[in-house]
């Protein structure tokens, strides 16, 4: 796969347009989400907005999406250390969580409003309705399966939606980590 831009160039330009005060949604809609050439995407992707297309391509390539990267960077700045794309389930090695505090068994998942069917913001696409609604219900079902597995393995899960304020999401994760550490220490 031929990357047209150096990955670090993307990260730097992304953060130039985002700030901790903004929402995660603002971050993902920021200008550096360059539209990939159509030869990369095939015809279907032409119905997507640039932000949706960008996230889709990121998922296909297994790269980080804007909101997740913004959250990870903020957590790191708070002094937290974590595993990325961690696979907690021996019986299902393909299923991973976005961010994991392995000793405390806390998982954090960052979900895009569109792709994960956010109850507040998901709107059905006007074209290719059957294909896309099937795709999104598949994602939602997979999220639910993952939640059940995490619970069965004694993990707690923090779900962060793309529309949330970054600062609020960071606070929630910090609270959960502190609480788990306190429980661990006592
Ligand atoms: Zn939403």
Image: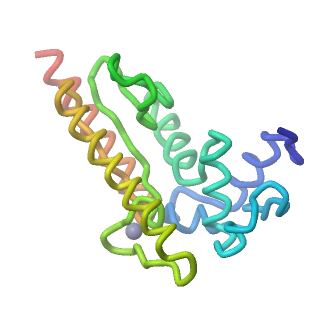
Quick one: which residue is furthest to the bottom in this view? Answer: 126
Q: How many marks?
A: 0
Q: Residue at x 56, y 68 (%)?
A: 26
Of residues 159 and 27, the one drawn nearer to the viewer in this rendering: 159
Quick one: which residue is furthest to the left in this view? Answer: 186
* 183 sits left or right of 90 in the view: left
The quadrant holding residue 45 is bottom right
Q: Quadrant of the C terminus?
A: top left
* 133 sits left or right of 57 in the view: left
The quadrant holding residue 55 is bottom right
Q: Residue at x 33, y 74 (%)?
A: 120
Q: Quadrant of ligand 1?
A: bottom left
Of residues 1 and 22, the one drawn nearer to the viewer in this rendering: 1
**Color style of the picture:** rainbow
* 38 sits left or right of 94 in the view: right
Q: Residue at x 87, y 47 (%)?
A: 5
Residue 125, compared with residue 101, is above or below; it is: below
Q: Residue at x 43, y 69 (%)?
A: 133
Quick one: which residue is furthest to the front in this view? Answer: 130
The percent coordinates of residue 107 (x first, y second) are 33, 34
The quadrant holding residue 32 is bottom right
Residue 15, compared with residue 29, is above or below; it is: above
The percent coordinates of residue 149 (x first, y second) are 24, 32
Residue 37, compared with residue 181, is above or below; it is: below
Of residues 28 and 143, the one drawn nearer to the viewer in this rendering: 143
* 87 sits left or right of 11 in the view: left
The percent coordinates of residue 93 (x first, y second) are 42, 22
The percent coordinates of residue 24 (x first, y second) are 50, 61
Q: Quadrant of the N terminus?
A: top right
């Amino acid at each position: 796969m031929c990357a047209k831009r150096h990955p670090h160039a993307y990260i730097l330009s992304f953060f130039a347009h985002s700030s901790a005060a903004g929402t995660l949604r603002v971050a993902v809609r920021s200008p550096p989400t360059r539209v990939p050439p159509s030869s990369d995407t095939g015809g279907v992707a032409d119905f997507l907005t640039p932000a949706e297309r960008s996230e889709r391509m990121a998922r296909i390539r297994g790269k980080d999406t804007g909101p997740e990267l913004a959250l990870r960077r903020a957590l790191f700045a708070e002094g937290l250390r974590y595993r990325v794309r961690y696979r907690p389930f021996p019986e299902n090695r393909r299923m991973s969580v976005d961010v994991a505090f392995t000793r405390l068994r806390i998982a954090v998942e960052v979900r895009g409003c569109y792709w994960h069917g956010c109850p507040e913001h998901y709107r059905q696409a006007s074209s290719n309705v059957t294909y896309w609604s099937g795709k999104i219900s598949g994602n939602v079902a997979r999220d639910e399966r993952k939640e059940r597995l995490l619970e069965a393995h004694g993990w707690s899960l923090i779900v962060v939606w793309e529309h949330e304020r970054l600062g609020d999401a960071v606070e929630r994760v910090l609270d959960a980590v502190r609480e788990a550490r306190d429980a661990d220490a006592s």
